[in-house]
Image (cartoon, rainbow, N blue to C red):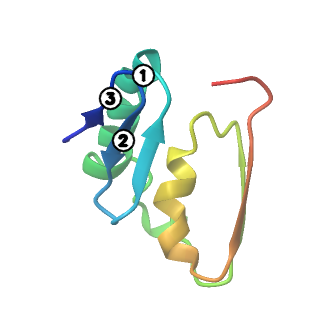
Amino acid sequence: MNTDSNESGAFSIPLPNALTFTGTDAAQKASAKFLSWEIFKKKFYDREQFQGQDGFRVVDIGANMGLFALWMSPQIGSGTICCVEPTSA
């Protein structure tokens, strides 16, 4: 997965669904690369009974960095996603 970084540590990871994850520091980068590989390449959530549909409302409890939301977003079209992370990721 190609990642771009700058001097401040900020980085971006282009995702296979045409969205981009943007992170703020080098410590987050390794986790983001692993999670994006697991979700988009290994297809961890890609199950028949676990697909979004246009108009769905999704609540992501324990959202961490929000990569699940980035995976689900294109599937729900006009739907909404509420991400909750009780501690900073």
Where residue 1 sits in the image (x, y, percent)?
20, 41
Q: Residues within 10 Å of mark 3 (few under 14, many from 20)?
A: few
Which image quarter: residue 34? top left
First of labels 3, 2 by sequence position: 3
Q: Relative to 44, does residue 70 appear above or below in the rendering?
A: below
- Disc number placed over residue 12 in the picture, else none: 2
Q: Nearer the viewer, residue 85 or 46?
A: 85
Residue at image mark 1: 8
- Give the residue at the far left of this rendering: 2
**Would you identify the image quadrant in which residue 76 lies?**
bottom right
Q: Nearer the viewer, residue 25 or 88?
A: 25
Amino acid type of disc 1?
Ser
Q: Residues within 10 Å of mark 1 (few under 14, many from 20)?
A: few
Foreground: 34 or 88? 88
Residue that badge 3 annotates: 6
The residue positioned farthest toward the front in the image shown: 7
